Image (spheres, rainbow, N blue to C red):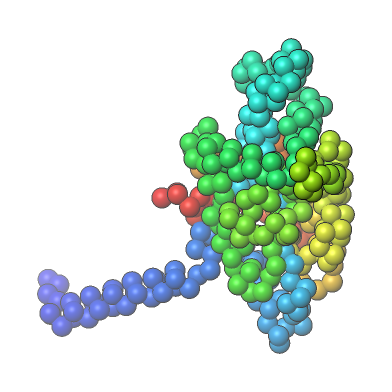
Amino acid sequence: MKPIPTLAAFTRLLALGALLLLAARAQAATDPLPSWNDGPAKQAIVAFVNETTDQSSATFVSPAQRIATFDQDGTLWVSHPIYTQVMYCLDQVPKLVEKKPPLREIEPFKTVLSGDREAIASLPMKDLETILAATLTGMSTDAFQAEVKAWLAKARDPRWHRPFTALTYQPMQELLHYLRDHGYKTFIVTGGGQDFVRVYSDAVYGIPPEQVVGSAGVTKYEYDKDGRPFLIKEPKLLLNDDHAGKPEGIHLMIGQRPHAAFGNSTGDRQMLEYTKAGDGARLSMLVLHDDAAREYAYGPAQGLPDTKVGSFSQALYDEATQAGWTVISIKNDWKRVFVFDQ
């Protein structure tokens, strides 16, 4: 027969339990990356920050050189089943046709107006570029910013029925804060439109407009009827900030090679290569979307479904493995995906 615990022993057990609970809460409070599982990805981030911010480290990086670049679509927020900016452009087509009625019978505007989702999804890239050029140019920069703000305020994602700006990845938001808390300046380097992302980057990511590098069109200086100057957006591409355009844009707009870079697709490959090629401690990371239950699953790396949106090829995965980049598995490395996850 087992002895019955004394009141004193029971009290000690309660006290021990309370201490363990307090210790767990303290650890959670001091963990700068609470939405990350403890694994290779989280460990790589913490080790990199420690190595580059400890003055006694051989790989110490001065505050002025602490640059971290982030792709946006698929890296900081949801990009499936279609890029958010493309959704914006499609939603602007009816307004455009009201101003220019002949477009109603011209492709690809006719297909967009039909509302046939399958047909819209099947539009070739050339047609999408026509839609983007027509809906992103021909107005002043101020008018464009106002249109984007108004759209973001009312538009909702069809799956979660939330504003698109609410669909940012909580682990990446924590990473942005963690890096900034250690003196890193964080930049968005995106293939998306620079003017589009700058509208909300500060409010959503804490990244001011001047720290957004994106695909940019030509603007022209003009005067309105009252003689006030303004910039008008013209249908001519100045910088295609994708693939090799990313390191080119980084040099043009930032002027320093990043010490850390984060992406999720083949369009980010050159940015990660460029970052890793620098001297000293460098961190190159790719987000792999492999969680269909909590977000989406696509590759085609590692046998995941193929996609035209944010493709992560097996060749990119193999390069990451060989070059010492870290692949972030949403399924395995993230405790939660969105801030609203339970």
Left or right of 269 on screen, residue 188: left
Work out whether 105 lies above or below 210. above
- What is the residue that sits farthest to the front in this orientation? 226
- What is the residue that sits farthest to the top in this orientation? 105
**Residue 224 position within the rendered picture, expressed as x and y whole percent measured from the top left:** 78, 42
Q: Is residue 215 visible?
A: no
Q: Residue shown at 78%/40% (left/top)? A: 225
Left or right of 279 on screen, residue 84: left
Work out whether 5 lies above or below 286. below
**Residue 246 position within the rendered picture, expressed as x and y whole percent measured from the top left:** 82, 52
Residue 300 picture quarter: top right
Q: Residue shown at 71%/85% (left/top)? A: 55
Quadrant the N terminus occupies: bottom left
**Residue 26 position within the rendered picture, expressed as x and y whole percent measured from the top left:** 41, 74
Count how many numbered circles sit on residues in the image: 0
In the image, 233 versus 289, the foreground residue is 233
Q: Is residue 142 visible?
A: yes
In the image, 18 versus 33, the foreground residue is 33
**Residue 187 position within the rendered picture, expressed as x and y whole percent measured from the top left:** 71, 60
- What is the residue that sits farthest to the bottom in this orientation? 56
Left or right of 2 on screen, residue 169: right
Q: Residue shown at 84%/54% (left/top)? A: 249
In the image, 72 versus 17, the foreground residue is 72
In the image, 328 versus 149, the foreground residue is 149
Left or right of 323 on screen, residue 11: left
